[in-house]
Amino acid sequence: MKHIARKRLGQHFLTDHAIIDGIVDAIGPQPGDAMVEIGPGLAAMTQPLVERLGRLTVIELDRDLAARLRSHAQLEVIESDVLKVDFTALAERLCARSTGQETAAGRPKLRVVGNLPYNISTPILFHLLDHVAVVQDQHFMLQKEVIDRMVARPASSDYSRLSVMLQWRYAMDNVLFVPPESFDPPPRVDSAIVRMVPLVEPPAMDIRLYGELVQTAFSQRRKILRNTLGKWLDARGFSGTFDVQRRAEEVPVHEYVALCQAVQHAAPNTQA
Ligand code: SAM
């Protein structure tokens, strides 16, 4: 029976075989990799991936699609909202059978892929950031505009909270452009594939504090930082040097990281 695409679940199914081959080549699946696909849908990417891997775990929220996928002998189907999946626990379980890269504790890591539902792509990226320690790499189809923001450099119009929240932890590049005609139904936007590889030696810092700092800085991104981040720094008793006469979009990632580390070590404000 033909599946009717559910808009609510961001369903746009890939139909262009040249594009699918290009994506699978960019991912480079190897037999034995502990790979997880988010939102397999009608298995457009799933099938060529599992042919190379031998076995693949998929996470699908749509009950009808999950039921179809369950009949595939080489797939493990997790019927769930991806935002509720504990990737650290999943890695523990899947990696017991894989031959991929290892964590510092000696356990192999997950390779995560997917043509993501665009309506929740940013929450998915942030959810996976919480589990980055168990991830080898990620390849995602996203709105091209979102990838432009992920990889943007300071002082460009795309440089934003998303750039600063991801670049401190991942090396990222845009590997393939995908036009709307590659899907059924076609989305109204251009798409692309991003490769995200966690940095081997990330800076040591409090990620919650970093998130708060970056959100405060970008709360009024076109204004100078004095009235936003400046006040936030004062409240934390920060007495170091940081030029707040700039706009959030002018500050490079390494300066946000250094500032977070300095605030973390600053004495708490006794007047607060
Ligand atoms: N991978 C397929 C393809 O490329 O043709 C389908 C991609 S479609 C853009 C997004 C897929 O994610 C759909 O299958 C949809 O049902 C699924 N999905 C949507 N929201 C989800 C969620 N919260 N958790 C898991 N899967 C979800």
Image: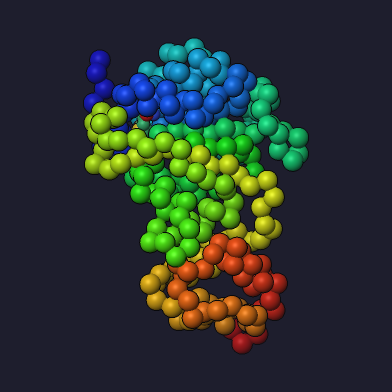
Q: Nearer the viewer, residue 70 or 25?
A: 25
Could you say which quadrant of the image residue 242 lies in?
Answer: bottom right
The residue located at (51%, 65%) in the rendering is 214
- Quarter for ligand 1? top left
Left or right side of 110 for 182: left
Residue 36 is at least partly visible in this image? yes
Residue 244, compared with residue 63, is above or below; it is below
* Residue occupying the point 67% across, 72% down: 262
- Front-most of 106 and 241? 241
The picture places residue 194, in percent across and down from the top left corner, at: 46, 40
Q: Residue at x 76, y 39 (%)?
A: 105
- Left/right of residue 24 with respect to residue 259 in the rendered view: left
> Which quadrant would the C terminus be assigned to in this image?
bottom right
Instruction: Give the colouring mode of the picture.
Output: rainbow
Q: Position of residue 123 (x, y in %)?
A: 44, 48
- Give the residue displayed 30% in from the left and 32% down from the top: 12
Q: Residue furthest bottom?
A: 271
Q: Relative to 2, is 76 on the left or the right?
A: right
Q: Is residue 7 above or below residue 213?
A: above
In what quadrant of the picture does the N terminus appear? top left
Q: Is residue 216 visible to us here?
A: no
Q: Residue 110 at x, y = what percent?
A: 60, 33
| Total numbered badges shown on the rendered structure | 0
Estimate the x, y position of residue 55 in percent, counting from the top left.
Answer: 55, 18
